[in-house]
Image (spheres, rainbow, N blue to C red):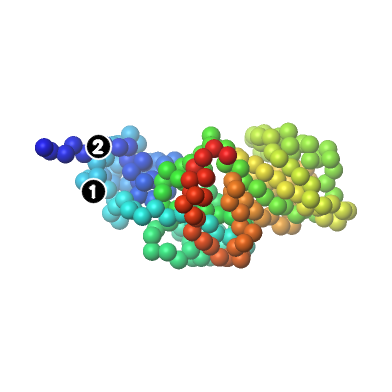
Amino acid sequence: MVKIMEEIRLQKFLAEAGIASRRKCETYIKEGKVKVNGKTAQIGDRVKENDNIYFNGKKVKKEEKKVYILLNKPIGYVTTVKDEYDRKKVTDLVNVKERVVPVGRLDINTTGALLFSNDGEFIYHITHPKHEIEKTYIVQVKGSVSQNEIEKLQKGIKIENYVTKPAKVKLINSNENTSELEIIIHEGKNRQVRKMMKAIQKEVIKLHRSKIGKLNVKDLKMGTWRYLKPHEVDKINETW
């Protein structure tokens, strides 16, 4: 009997091969970075496992071993695989034989929890807003923070062209010089916490992501990483 090979969407194949999330893979396809059997791929293409699929000139093969890593990111590293300005990259800190990519991002001056994986479905689950994975931040700002300002953050505040979803905000300590808050959000828009602070006219001194869901970095030294345990991977794929 001849085995019929199942066709799947190209972006799903690329994600399962650990290239990036499905949404990012769609961008790569639109940018002409993917070829299938010698032809530049298009959105909507479907592929089989025996097709010759290339990304940036390199043949794509599905990773057999799925890898899940938690890093405590230090200041001074950009969250990218390649950097045109030759800055230090978070991938420089994670030395594994599998090709893993960052799951989401932290800006160069933000420290804390950052996940890596080669599992496209896992990446999709963490990064897609519909799954509402909570991210916990500790932010230190200049000056005192009032109850009114906390309530604005809790209800949702206008930053640029959108209003943030309600956040969980707790004042850890505050005086006339500095304040420290815990902020829990699940949107993860670009530099969101910094922009939220700017919206209440507060200058950020330090920003640290302490948790992604229930995964925290309190036992990880800055700049070090560890593999997730199987039960942690299972847990993060649940709705928390």
Where does residue 210 sit, x and y in percent of width and height? 64, 53
Report if residue 57 is visible in the image: no
**Mark 2 is on which residue type?**
Glu
Residue highlighted by disc 1: 52
Query: What is the distance, in whole Å, between disc 1 and disc 2 at their CAs?
Result: 15 Å
Where does residue 235 sit, x and y in percent of width and height? 52, 45
Q: Earlier in the sequence, mark 1 or mark 2?
A: 2
User: Relative to 233, is 171 on the left or the right?
Assistant: right
Where does residue 89 sit, x and y in percent of width and height? 51, 62
Say which mark, if any, is on residue 91.
none
Q: Residue at x 77, y 52 (%)?
A: 180
**Mark 1 is on which residue type?**
Asn
Residue highlighted by disc 2: 6
Quadrant containing the N terminus is top left
Mark 2, Cα crowd under 10 Å, few <14 / some 14-19 / many 20+, is: few
Q: Residue at x 66, y 34 (%)?
A: 165
- Count of number-bearing discs: 2
Question: Observer-nearest residue: 204 or 134?
Answer: 134
Q: Secondary structure at mark 1?
A: loop
User: Relative to 128, is 62 on the left or the right?
Assistant: left
User: Relative to 216, is 37 on the left or the right?
Assistant: left
Q: Residue furthest left?
A: 1
Q: Residue at x 30, y 41 (%)?
A: 41
